[in-house]
Image (cartoon, rainbow, N blue to C red):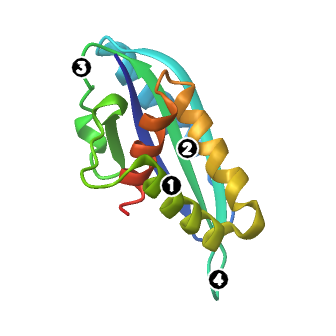
Amino acid sequence: MKFVQLWSTRSLTGLPDWRKDTRTLNELLREIQSKGGEVLDVKVSIGVGGHSTTYTTCVYLIIYESDEPIDLEARKDTLTVAKIRSVEIKGKSIREMYDELLELYLSSYGYSGRAKLERAIEDIMRTGASREEAIKWLYKKEKL
């Protein structure tokens, strides 16, 4: 089965600490592999924000294959493991979830919100999930 491991960092100076992030990312990849996982892909998304100060957030998406989700005990505070195909949202249609996600992305990113949402859906679909599963996963991730 395919799983994703999310890990994020935030820099209050506006500049990511690439050396530290690279060391940590390599440790995570080594740990996944040492526990029997096969790393398929790693993606990073970088966002800049803040009202009075600028900060940078990097979100890393590690896509791996394993029989079960791999527990990275040492990093539980900054990691999330998700089994993509297990996302269940009760009481909402895919269309309603997509519309709410689109509203969120448009309010966050302006005119480029639709393109960012579609790109996020496509990234999840590359892991083997269907479009519907990707929308459900994003909806749950955004806690809508």
Say which label, 1 or 4, has the lower sequence index.
1
Say which label, 2 or 3, has the lower sequence index.
2
| Residues at discs 3 and 1 in contact (Cβ within 8 Å) | no
Q: Which residue is mark 3?
A: 68
Alpha-carbon span between mark 2 and mark 3: 26 Å
User: Which mark lies nearer to you, 2 or 1?
Assistant: 1
Q: Which residue is mark 2?
A: 21
What residue is rendered at 29% in x and 52% in y? 77
Q: Which residue is mark 4?
A: 53
Residue 126 position (above or below residue 104): above
* Residue 69 placement (x, y as % from top left): 26, 26
* Residue 32 placement (x, y as % from top left): 36, 22
Residue 59 position (above or below residue 96): above
Residue furthest to the bottom = 52
Q: Which residue is mark 1?
A: 9
| Residues at discs 2 and 4 in contact (Cβ within 8 Å) | no
Say which label, 3 or 4, has the lower sequence index.
4
Task: Please rate how many residues cluster around mark 4, counting C-alpha atoms within 10 Å: few if below 14, some from 14 to 19, many from 20.
Answer: few
* Residue 14 placement (x, y as % from top left): 68, 67
Is 36 left or right of 108, judged from the image as shown?
Answer: left
Alpha-carbon span between mark 2 and mark 4: 22 Å
Task: Please rate how many residues cluster around mark 2, counting C-alpha atoms within 10 Å: few if below 14, some from 14 to 19, many from 20.
Answer: some
Q: Amino acid at mark 1?
A: Thr
User: Which mark lies nearer to you, 2 or 4?
Assistant: 4
User: Which mark lies nearer to you, 3 or 4?
Assistant: 3
What residue is rendered at 62% in x and 79% in y? 50
Q: Amino acid at mark 3?
A: Glu
* Secondary structure beneath label 2: helix
Number of numbered discs visible in the structure rendering: 4
